[in-house]
Amino acid sequence: MNIVTLSWRYLWSRPLASALNLLLMTLGLTSITFVLLASHQLERAFERDLAGIDVVVGAKGSPLQLILAGVFHIDVPPGNIPLADVKALAQHPQVAQLIPLSLGDSMRGFRIVGTTADYLAHYQAKLAHGALWTEPMQAVVGAQVAATTGLKVGHRFTGTHGLDGGGDGHEQTPYTVSGVLAPCACVLDRLILTATESVWKVHEDMHSGDAPLDAQDQEALEAERQVTIALIRYKTPLAAVTFPRYVNSDTGMQAAAPAVEITRLLGMVGVGTRVLQGFGAVLLLTAALGVFIALWSAVRERRADLAMLRMLGAPPAKVGALLLCEALWLALLASALGLLGAHGLTAVAGWLLQGEKSLVVDGWQWVPIEAWVPVGAVAVAGLAALLPALAAYRVDVAQLLNSR
């Protein structure tokens, strides 16, 4: 007697009840797995993009906004800070490295960032084609930018004012693509990088118009130059105690600690993830209850079948295993469908985030914690089937035959 085949046929002898239990269990596993996948990838993205950045300095405002705008480029920065103040910070004895970022323009929704080559070196970015910029108005595009826009080495493009791509164009000052970055699975994939001088030139030319500037006007413009964000790495860990206090109290700028702000953000987001996980757990427990009721009813309906199996020589353990196999089939099917559904939802979420030029989420990336999803499903289904299997194990053949 093939217990596996027989249990499969018994399972689908009640198609509506089995399909409902399968649906509930699949939805529960999908919800739980989706939360695990999304939260794992977002946390990894935060860790990857924040690595090596001890503090972010910018204009006064929301510290979290400063982090989201300066590190992840998914928010609008609170303002600009004078270049002279940034240069003074770079000379501070507690600062090992300062990377300036100048924002304000975009191209088809992708942000144009004026910076230095240190920014690429920080993320260990490598060029797939071309070379880094060697003069103003040359740009290096990230892998996602190149894939979406079709930009290649030698192509020219113009930026638009604003970070959402809806502002006025800078047709008089086009950029030339000097290089395309290889995918790095970091924030650089969705950025257009250029020299800081390029950003200054675009906006200075926009304000000056076609009229040539004399030396005095040019000097005045250079004195008013600003940057948006400064990413800073400390010389020693002790600087984390005193440097932010110095910036916040003794300067007109603001210092935000990425670790603190992201922990706060994840804490706020964690409420929603726990609610979704709880919803999935409720569905899973409801499915377990449905499995228990279905199998318990099956034992009562199949008493004659079970007696016949015993008469044909099936031992009590094999009869009990028949019920457990039904639950196992249900758990394995729900696990496969739940994992597939969760990855599909994650892929859709990643596609939506990509459309918003936001964090990268890969729908088909597998994480180790997913291995526990089938284990959990089998455990829940096994517990639900335990009492019905025990009842089948204890079926009294003689009593059944006498009652008939």
Image: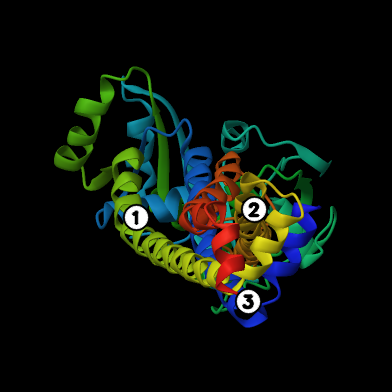
Identified by mark 1, the residue type is: Gly
Q: Nearer the viewer, residue 97 or 258?
A: 258
Q: Which of 395 and 83 is in front in this view?
A: 395
- Residue pointed to by mark 1: 270
Looking at the rendered structure, the secondary structure element under dot 2 is: helix
Q: Which residue is drawn at 72% across and 50% down?
A: 314
- Residue pointed to by mark 3: 19
Whether residue 26 is visible here, answered yes or no, is no
Residue 337 relative to residue 298: left or right: right
- Classify 188 as above or below 298: above
Q: In which quarter of the image is residue 364?
A: bottom right
Q: Which residue is drawn at 70% across and 68% down?
A: 10
Identified by mark 3, the residue type is: Ala
Residue 6 relative to residue 209: left or right: right
Whether residue 135 is visible here, answered yes or no, is yes
- Residue pointed to by mark 2: 319
Residue 33 relative to residue 314: left or right: left
| Earlier-in-chain disc, 1 versus 2 | 1
| Earlier-in-chain disc, 1 versus 3 | 3
